[in-house]
Amino acid sequence: MFAIPGQSPVTVTPAAAAQIAKLMTKDKSAGLRIGVKKGGCAGMEYTMEYVAEAEAHDEVVEVGEARVLIAPMAQMFLFGTEIDYETSLLESGFKFRNPNVVDACGCGESIKFDETLSQTAVQPS
């Protein structure tokens, strides 16, 4: 939908690909769908869910055995994002390094995008 031919809309680090593939096998899923929704103190939140199949307009990114599906309405917000998986003494989880984010809340759970990007996403075509 918003892809540039020959360029992946997101990159997936080896650590994230390994974790996604591991969880896909455990859950017997077709992939990890990522998206964004309104919510949180900064205005938007990432969503993640393992799904049984891709939907018609999902953008599919495959790295080894890992498969990431990007929901249609999230594609413009996630373009250029690096998805990583980090483990520390206190926590482990997926991290999004997204160049489209202009602000985030202190806990890191919600994000804010540039106003022009947000307005473009809700304009009818």
Image (cartoon, rainbow, N blue to C red):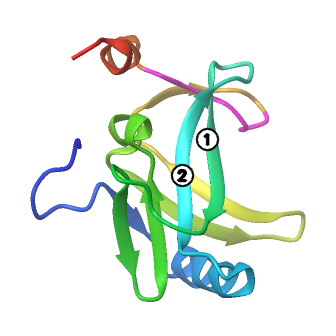
Q: Is residue 13 visible?
A: no
Pick the front one: 54 or 40: 54
Q: Mark yes or no: residue 58 visible.
A: yes
Part of the protein shown in magenta: 107-113
- Label 2: which residue? 34
Query: Which quadrant does the C terminus fall into?
Result: top left
Which amino acid lies under the numbered mark 1 shown in the image of this protein? Tyr
Q: Measure the alpha-carbon separation of dots 1 and 2.
A: 7 Å
Q: Is residue 108 left or right of residue 112?
A: right
At 23% from the left edge and 43% from the top edge, which residue is drawn?
Answer: 1
**Quadrant housing residue 87:** bottom right
Q: Which residue is mark 1?
A: 46
Dot 1 falls on a residue whose secondary structure is strand
Q: Is residue 105 left or right of residue 81?
A: right
**Residue 30's disc number:** none
Residue 29: image location, x then y, percent:
62, 76
